[in-house]
Amino acid sequence: MRLQDFTGFLKLIEGGFKGDLGVRTMNRPTSLRVISHVRRYSSQVKSQKLHEMRDRMIRVDHAGEYGANRIYAGQMAVLGSTKSGPLIQHMWDQEKEHLRVFELLIPKYRARPTAMLPFWNIAGFALGAGTALLGEKAAMACTVAVESTITEHYNNQIRQLMSTNLEGNKELIDYITKFRDEEQEHHDTGLAEGAEQTPGYAALTNLIKTGCKAAIWISERV
């Protein structure tokens, strides 16, 4: 039975079946027992839905931060000794912290990691190294595209968490908000470093954004 189906039923019981509609009156002890069972079931449904939402969010966010780490690893493999090296390392260090947190949240919230991690391992490194081979500005264009998608993704999650259970989701909201702000910082850094000067910038970033959105969709489900 759907949760909303209980609404009218619960009101009818709480009224005690008072007979205006010709329905036999239910005695109060029986009425209270039924109400208790209904409320217990309602609470179980809400708890299950909350767990499923958190499971999905933590799984995809862990996958995203894992992929981001591999992207920066690929960029550092190519550009680590250039003038962009320290900047890329700084952003990578922040991504390492994001990944560390989600690796702690997985067992805490009994979330299931995505089965796609081996693929994201290879794909992330290839994307980072491949764009870095095109030059420092192309690497920054990759950063802009990825972080733009992730920032939007985190904003959507924050809104959903706040509308569902603000107090109960406080820990996740705080972490995701902090990480969202740092991803936005990476995005802005990429622009400041001349990402838009990359030849074919629009085509490149749109392609990467599409890939990121596909990865998000897959990681939420697999």
Image (spheres, rainbow, N blue to C red):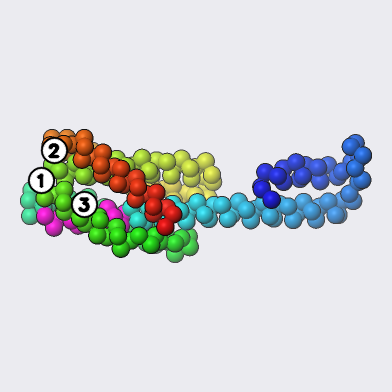
Sooner in the amino-acid sequence: mark 3 or mark 1: 3
Mark on residue 65? none
* Picture residue at 92% right of the left edge, 39% below the top: 22
Label 3: element kind = helix
Residue 72 on image: x %, y %: 21, 53
Classify residue 176 as left or right of residue 165: left
Q: Is residue 183 visible?
A: no
* Picture residue at 43% right of the left edge, 44% below the top: 157
Tell me which segment is drawn in magenta.
Answer: 65-78
Residue 222 on image: x %, y %: 42, 57
Read off the residue under disc 1: 135
The quadrant in which residue 147 appears is top left
Looking at the image, the residue that sits furthest to the left is 82
> Pointers 3 and 1 in contact (CB under 8 A)?
no
Q: Taking 31 as reference, is 151 above or below it?
A: above
Sooner in the amino-acid sequence: mark 2 or mark 3: 3
Read off the residue under disc 3: 127
Residue 28 on image: x %, y %: 87, 51
Q: CA distance from mark 2 to mark 3?
A: 16 Å
Read off the residue under disc 2: 198
Q: CA distance from mark 1 to mark 2?
A: 8 Å
Residue type, numbered disc 1? Gly
> Pointers 1 and 2 in contact (CB under 8 A)?
yes
Neighbor class of circle 1 (other Cα within 10 Å; few <14, some 14-19, many 20+) is some
Residue type, numbered disc 2? Thr
Q: Taking 161 as reference, is 112 above or below it?
A: below
Residue 162 on image: x %, y %: 49, 42
Label 1: element kind = loop
Classify residue 80 as left or right of residue 185: left
Q: Main secondary structure of the magenta part?
A: helix
Q: Is residue 140 visible?
A: yes
